[in-house]
Amino acid sequence: MGIEELGAVLRETRVRRGMSQQALADKAALSRNFVAQIERGESTPTVATVSRLAAALVTTVGELLGEASAAGEPGDAVAVPLVADRIAAGPPLLLADHIEGHEPLPRALLRSLGVDPAQAMLVRVGKDQDSMAETIPPGATVLLDRAPRREIVPQGIYAVREDAAGETGCTIKRLVLDAASRVLILLSDNPAHLPRAIRLRAGQPLSDVIVGRVVWWAPPAPPRR
């Protein structure tokens, strides 16, 4: 479901409940302007915001997304681990020690994106990471599909393993793989950042370098007014 469709469903649900935008905003602890922007399809809410709107409207996230859970299907939301970009590239045991929390993600959203809930991870991009600012703004939250992969989608956006200043983390880049020379080219949307390359060792799997594929992202929530 696109943001415009979500906005339309949100407005229809609110009107059916007999609530004004201000009443919904107060109940969901949001600003009225932000609710209005979501309804007009001008702002993309985070998964946490969608959950708060659903709770305020006494409905489910799945219904706001236009897909109610089938009878007998597991719960509507999946608790997806959220980590900061500085440690997002660590091994599973390291990640387990650095999870900041869990965000409820709609099961319908994961299903529509083809993501196994067990392979889903959220990464909060640092506010100083502007290399992809033309597409993904600094401070955004990105959803990664960490399923092991043998190939990449050319120019697809991925989280790439990075060790800098003694810290393990990841950077978000577009990738191009030169299969013949086994060179992974990292491209930025921001022209201020030059491309760089990572040469893979013979037999080295992509999973050694690629943390996961970016399948969805949400901008940082605007400050309440």
Image (cartoon, grey):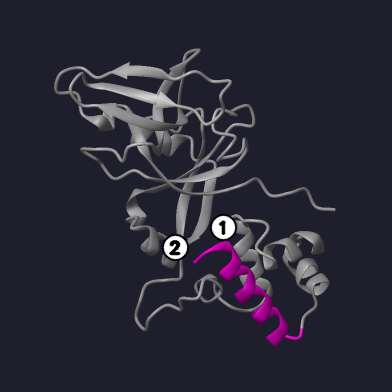
- Tell me the tag on residue 179: none
Q: CA distance from mark 1 to mark 2?
A: 10 Å
Q: Pinpoint residue 176: horizontal percent, then vertical percent.
A: 33, 30
Q: Amino acid at mark 2?
A: Leu
**Which secondary structure is most common in the magenta stretch?**
helix
Residue at position x 77%, y 80% in the image: 19
Please identify the residue farthest to the front as the structure is shown: 191
| Residue found at the very far left of the displayed protein | 203
- Residue 197 point in image, percent of width and height: 36, 18
Q: How far from the left and from the top, in percent, is residue 67?
A: 46, 76
Range of residues picked out in magenta: 1-18
Q: Depth check: give the residue in front, 196 or 88.
A: 196
Q: How many numbered dots are placed on residues in this image? A: 2
Answer above or below: position of 163 versus 94: above
**Residue 4 covered by magenta stretch:** yes
- Per the image, label 2 sits on a secondary structure element best described as helix
The residue beneath circle 1 is 47
Vertical order, 102 against 158 (above or below):
below
Residue identified by numbered label 2: 109
The image quadrant of residue 196 is top left
